Amino acid sequence: MARLPASHRPARSPRCQDGEAERDRRKGREPVTEYEILLLLDPDLDEDRQSEIVSRTRDLVEKGGGSWDLHDPWGRRKLAYEIAHKGEGSYHLLQFTCESETLDEVSRVLRIDDGVMRHMATRRIKGSPARPVAVAAPARNDAEIASEVEEEEE
C-alpha cells in the first residue's frame, strides 16, 4: 500500500505529535482523560442521600487512580419534561480526571442507583472556558431607593 504524501495525511493532534499517547498504548496503559458528569438526582432525596451518591462517585474515581477536581451543586431546577412523573430535579456537576475503565465503572454504578434519574458523562476539552463566576448586582444607595419610594407614592 502506498503512503500518502505529507500534505495529504490528516493532521495529528498535539498529544500524538509528542508521542505520549503512543508510548502509553505500547505500555498497555490507557491515557488519563479529564471528564465531567452532570447528575440529575431525584428531588425527593434528602441532602444526606445526595451527598452519599456524590461521595460514592468520588470514592470510585479515587479508587481507580483518578483525581477529583470539582463538585458544583446547582440545586433544584425545573425539567423540560417529566421524568418518572417528576417535574424537578437536583443537578450536580462533577469534574475529575481518570482512565476510561474507571469512567465505565462510575457510569455502571450510577445507572444502577435509584436516586439517579439521569447522568451524562462528557470529556472536558483543554482550553475550554472556565466556570462562569456570578457577579453581584451593583449596590444601590439610599438616595436612589428614596427617590423610587417618592415616585411610587405620587
Image (cartoon, rainbow, N blue to C red):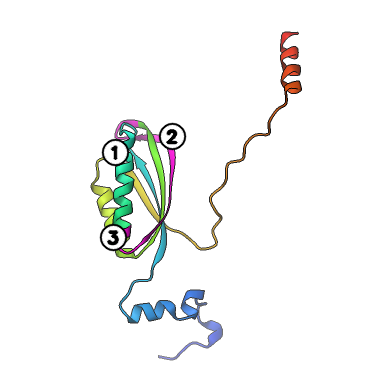
As measured in the structure, the alpha-carbon distance from the residue carrying label 3 to the one carrying label 1 is 21 Å
Q: Are marks 2 and 3 in contact (CB under 8 Å)?
A: no
Q: Secondary structure at mark 2?
A: strand
Q: Position of residue 34 (x, y in %)?
A: 42, 61
Q: Secondary structure at mark 1?
A: helix
Q: Is residue 54 visible?
A: yes
Q: Is residue 80 magenta?
A: yes
Q: Are marks 3 and 1 in contact (CB under 8 Å)?
A: no
**Which residue in the protein does label 2 denote?**
77
Which range is magenta? 62-86
As measured in the structure, the alpha-carbon distance from the residue carrying label 2 to the one carrying label 3 is 31 Å
Crowd rating for badge 2 (residues with CA inside 10 Å; few <14, some 14–19, many 20+): few
Q: Position of residue 143 (x, y in %)?
A: 76, 21
Q: Residue at x 56, y 84 (%)?
A: 7
Mark 2 or mark 3: which is in front?
A: 3
The three-letter code of the residue at mark 1 reads Arg
Crowd rating for badge 1 (residues with CA inside 10 Å; few <14, some 14–19, many 20+): few
Q: Is residue 58 magenta?
A: no
Sequence-first tag of 2 and 3: 3
Q: Residue at x 34, y 65 (%)?
A: 99
**Which residue in the protein does label 1 denote?**
49
Q: Main secondary structure of the magenta part?
A: strand
**Which residue in the protein does label 3 denote?**
63
Q: Position of residue 31 (x, y in %)?
A: 38, 71
List the single residue furthest toward the bottom: 2
Q: Secondary structure at mark 3?
A: helix
Sequence-first tag of 2 and 1: 1
Image quadrant containing the N terminus: bottom left
Mark 2 or mark 1: which is in front?
A: 1
